[in-house]
Amino acid sequence: MTAPSDCRRVSAGRSANGGLRLSGAALLLVLFGSTLAYCVQSAGGIRLLDVRFAGTGGAPMSALLYIPRNATAKTPAPGILAVHGYFNSREAQDGFAIELARRGFVVLALDQPGHGFSAPPAFANHFGGPDGLAYLRSLDVVDNTNIGLEGHSMGGWAVVDAAAAYPHGYRAVVLEGSSTGAPFAPEGTPAFPRNLAVVYSRLDEFSQTMWGVETAAEVTQSRKLWRVFGTDGVIVPDRVYGDVANGTARVLFTPPGTHPMDHISPAAIGDAIDWFQRTLHGGTPKPAADQIWYWKEIGTLIALAGFVALLLGVFDFILTLPYFAPLAAAPAPCGLARDGRWWLTFLLGTTLPVITLLPFFGLGGRLLPASHWLPQAFTNELVTWAVLNALLLIALSLLPTRFSTTNASPAARTLQPRRAMLAALWTIGIGYLVAVAAEFFFKIDFRIWFIAVRPMSLWQMRAFLIYLLPITFYFVIALRALHGRLAVRSDSVSAQYLCNIAALVAGMVAFLAIEYGSLAADHHLLTLQPTDALRVIIAINFVPLLSIAAVISTFAYRRTGSTLPGALICGLLVTWYVVVNQATQAT
């Protein structure tokens, strides 16, 4: 094999051993991480069930049900309905669910309509909250006179709706980064909902939407919150207002962190534990600080890393099969140095997607609302951004050579598209089967925080087929520009990977650093609209997702001399990732 500095490799006579070894090691990582995660979420004899039930009008609903050892038909236990927020799924509440189940509560972690495995459209049937509470109350292992409701963000509106639908069917509520009242929940009063804890992080991005104040730091001065607490003065955090016995207790917790950080905040999770142990009776109390959920996150992160490595190993092995062997070849010649044109390409590649992010997302939101043929509103925005960025890259490539973002010489050799497409399908197909197996046997997805890869529902599979072409088009164009100009002959293998990762994500990292630096400094994002704040949170996904795309595409390019196989794998993977992590608003 030639030295990495030649930007070439010898492809003849390749052995299957390398791909098999990498695939085997990757599967061991997946197995280890999945086992660790499963052991954490079943600690102490907790049974974890994947349940499906019919909601309003027979709508299919999905949830994870955590049943602690103490909960039986003879000795029913207190129950908790836990509901995730927008763009999430039942697994997003695992920190709350694991810790509450460890304390003897039966926990139903719900998929909202249009999320996870629950049928679309999103927002239907009061966000699924009343249906979830009805199902929880029907279980013989649950003491239906002793139920708590917990919801994050939009999930908070779901549980407030559930409280309104069943005013005598619960005892306490915890709202994480959420609110009562407009725009989407019943108005709160000093008596509704019963025994309310508001957990509102100090840097929450949605203070105007939730509580009508400019910043999260001002939530104690929210007149909307005053009406719920029955007070005319500044609310003192951690002080209990009202009385638990008659259902009028209120408390405000203000843990450190941002809106999406509530999912992984020991303080926010501890506040929920503390409140339910105060307001519900029974279970097996433990100190709020006694938490183990983060080991489950570590386990699913290890499994996610193994999943990505598996894709690389499978692709490497596929190239040794006779039908796919013609794909293997040396990359095209590299540039000699990082000259002015290299830096121009790098800067354009890192800044253009960021500069266009909010304008193009906004344009997509206006032009492409959710519909039968384009069922995910925010995926429509992302597709608009992706396609327009790809067209901009094509336009730049047509400029005179000194301004072009691609090499004057061909960036890669031409392949038979059918072989490249089948290789990509086999690679992602095997990865998908592993994700299905992890969900079936271990009841987990591959995730860290709210960044997750998991099997698709039937409705998401339909969306996947719709969005696959435009997202793949973006990667075909963007990765051709990436590998056509940024490879440098003197770079080591690790430098090639790091450079390509930086090219795809450095601008997004800088954008997020500026936005959240502003939030930390003066409690404001630089964006002015609530929908833009949501888009900033969505942009967090870009960093790990595009880093993975850079690794996959570099790996594939070094083995085939073409950007096409890597682009097809990235198109399939990213489309899969996007559709399972967005809400489906239309059927």
Image (cartoon, helix red, strand yellow):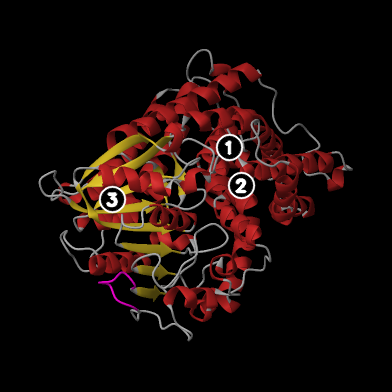
**Judging from the image, what secondary structure is the residue with disc 2 in?**
helix
Outermost residue toward the top? Answer: 322
**395 versus 180 height, above or below:** above
Residue 318 visible in image: yes
Amino acid type for the residue under numbered disc 3: Val
Left or right: residue 483 versus residue 63 is right
Foreground residue, 322 or 371? 371
Residue stretch rendered in magenta on the structure: 242-248
Report how far apart the C-alphas of labels 2 and 1 lie in the structure: 9 Å
Whole-percent x, y for residue 338 in the image: 71, 52
Give the side of residue 193 with respect to residue 427, left or right: left
Local SS, label 3: strand
Q: Is residue 471 left or right of residue 103?
A: right
> Pointer 3 and pointer 2: residues touching (CB < 8 Å)?
no
Secondary structure beneath dot 1 equals helix
Mark linked to residue 200? none
Majority secondary structure of magenta residues? loop
Residue depicted at x 48% and y 75%: 227
Label placed on residue 107: 3
Q: Which three-letter amino acid code belongs to the residue tagged 1? A: Ser
Q: Nearer the viewer, mark 1 or mark 3?
A: 3
Mark 3 crowd level (few <14, some 14–19, many ≥20, 10 Å Cα): many
Q: Residue at x 39, y 26 (%)?
A: 17
Q: Are marks 2 and 1 in contact (CB under 8 Å)?
A: yes
Label 2 vs 1, first from the N-terminus: 2
Q: Position of residue 213 (x, y in %)?
A: 58, 74
- Categorize mark 2 by other alpha carbons within 10 Å: few (<14), some (14-19), many (20+): many
Q: Position of residue 187 (x, y in %)?
A: 50, 64
For residue 500, which numbered disc appears in the image? Answer: 2
| Residue type, numbered disc 2 | Asn
123 vs 193, left or right, is right
Q: Which residue is mark 1?
A: 553
